[in-house]
Amino acid sequence: MPDPPRLLVGLKARASVDLQVPQILPEVTWNYLERTESGDRSRAEAMLIGSLTREMGSFDPAHAPLLRFVQTIYTGVDPTTFDRFGPSVQVAGNVGGFAPFVSEHAVTLALAAARNLRGAGKMVESGRLRPAPDHRLMWGRTAVILGYGEIGRSIATRLRPFGMRIVGLTALVGWLRGATRCTPRTASRRRSRRGTSCSRPAR
């Protein structure tokens, strides 16, 4: 009978996890959370999950008294209810882990929208090339980024060479790296939460 897992993986079973976890942690016994009986969870010291609100489901950390560390593979932990964990449990988010991929995708979509690639594609499908569809220039325009964390700043870094003015909005209050001015947002602004507006002029 295998030893109870020291690591609980709160992800859907997949071949990549089956391959990589034993390679990275060869001496650590592990199993998927959904495949582990409640009694066997009592020896778990760590968890690897995607989302604290999605993958954990009805799991009660009280059933894992040795639990000391929870690592999420996704970036956001804002909606997490940390009260469900004891004071001895540390929770780590994967801050910025997906920033290069998401920011490149965001810039791709911005360029596609500015150049009206969808409209151009429909013209080509219909056998027409002229007149060219209307498109917009990104140079000199303002990009408003809702959420100025690692991903937001990564998007700003990629948009700035286009000569765009960057305005980042965040729920955090105070100065943020990469912004030249941060203005506190007030609750009187429509549909806004208390936070900070950060802007950086194009260079």
Image: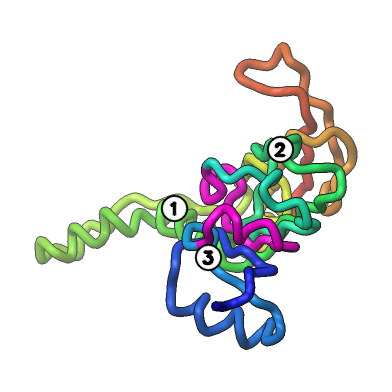
Looking at the rendered structure, the kind of residue marked 2 is Arg
Give the camera-side residue of 147 and 162. 147
- Evaluate whether residue 167 shows in this view: no
Q: Residue 131 vs residue 94: left or right?
A: left
Q: Which residues are magenta?
A: 36-57
Identity of the residue furthest to the front in this view = 1
Q: Position of residue 142 (x, y in %)?
A: 63, 43
Name the mark nearer the viewer: 3 or 1.
3
Give the camera-side residue of 192 and 66. 66
Residue drawn where x is 54% and y is 59% of the image: 33
- Quarter where residue 87 is shown: top right
* Crowd band around label 2 with a 10 angstrom C-alpha radius: few (<14), some (14–19), many (20+): few
Q: Position of residue 107 (x, y in %)?
A: 54, 59
Residue 32's label in the rendered image is 3
Q: Position of residue 46 (x, y in %)?
A: 72, 62
- Residue under label 1: 114
Q: Residue 147 vs residue 18: left or right?
A: right
Give the camera-side residue of 30 and 38. 38
* Crowd band around label 3 with a 10 angstrom C-alpha radius: few (<14), some (14–19), many (20+): some
* Contact between labelled residues 1 and 3, with CB atoms less than 8 Å apart: no
Residue drawn where x is 68% and y is 16% of the image: 189
Identity of the residue furthest to the left in this view = 126
Label 1 secondary element: helix
